[in-house]
Image (cartoon, rainbow, N blue to C red):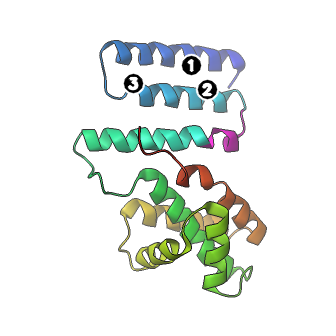
């Protein structure tokens, strides 16, 4: 995308956000953040720098779904389903690649790097393997595991570090 195309897309998106704002649409904040994220990526901002925006987008998405009655308040947030799905896949892949000799050691390392409690990660990973976790987390787990199997332990751990913004979001919006 050229800088001029990115600029035009930004202006069109901001016009749509303005329309939603003026019409008191409940998703105008989500649309604004999404516009900012897309523009940042279009102009070449590194994906890692945009992760905090994506994490906040997930918080807004969860809030909208609760307000629309499509999600219960105690249901796992999108951020946690994604982060925990990735973290669970990382544990499995670290074991499979031989980067860590045991599941507990892999869980402790993933927990430390991601900010996810190791006992909760252990339980969540078991639930994914038993297909008792949220469907989106199982899907994320399977996709992440396929990706992780093509890398090495260092690649997996580098990805795990990037989960922190998704674990550490403010749910009080």
Sequence-first disc among 2 and 1:
1
Which residue position holds label 2? Answer: 39
- Identify which residue is drawn at 75% across, 64% down: 155
Is the N terminus in the top left, top right, bottom left or bottom right quadrant? top right
Circle 2 residues within 10 Å: few <14, some 14–19, many ≥20: some
Cα distance between the residues tagged 2 and 1:
8 Å
Question: Viewer-proximal residue, 86 or 115?
Answer: 115
- Residue behind mark 1: 9
- Which quarter of the image is occupied by the C terminus? top left
**Residue 152, can we see it?**
no
Q: Residues within 10 Å of mark 1 (few under 14, many from 20)?
A: some
Identify residue for label 3. 28
> For residue 125, which numbered disc appears in the image?
none
Considering the whole magenta stretch, tell me its main secondary structure. Answer: helix
Which segment did they paint magenta? Answer: 45-51
Determine whether, in the image, residue 136 is placed left or right of residue 75.
right
Residue, x 68% and y 40% (percent of image)? 49
Considering depth in this image, is 93 or 66 the residue closer to the camera? 66
Q: Is residue 36 left or right of residue 48?
A: left
């Amino acid at each position: 995308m050229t800088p001029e195309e990115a600029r035009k897309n930004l202006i069109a998106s901001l016009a749509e956000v303005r329309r939603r704002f003026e019409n008191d649409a409940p998703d105008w904040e989500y649309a604004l953040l999404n516009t900012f994220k897309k523009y940042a990526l279009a102009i070449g901002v590194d994906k890692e720098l945009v992760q905090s925006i994506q994490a906040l987008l997930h918080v807004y998405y969860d809030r909208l779904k609760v307000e629309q009655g499509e999600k219960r308040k105690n249901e796992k947030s999108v951020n946690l389903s994604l982060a925990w799905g990735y973290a669970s896949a990382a544990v499995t892949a670290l074991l499979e690649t031989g980067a860590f000799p045991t599941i507990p050691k892999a869980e402790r390392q993933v927990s430390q790097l991601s900010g996810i409690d190791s006992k909760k990660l252990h339980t969540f990973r078991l639930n994914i393997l038993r297909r008792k976790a949220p469907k989106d987390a199982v899907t994320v787990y399977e996709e992440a595991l396929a990706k992780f199997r093509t890398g090495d332990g260092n690649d997996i751990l580098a990805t795990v570090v990037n989960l922190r913004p998704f674990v550490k979001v403010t749910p009080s919006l």
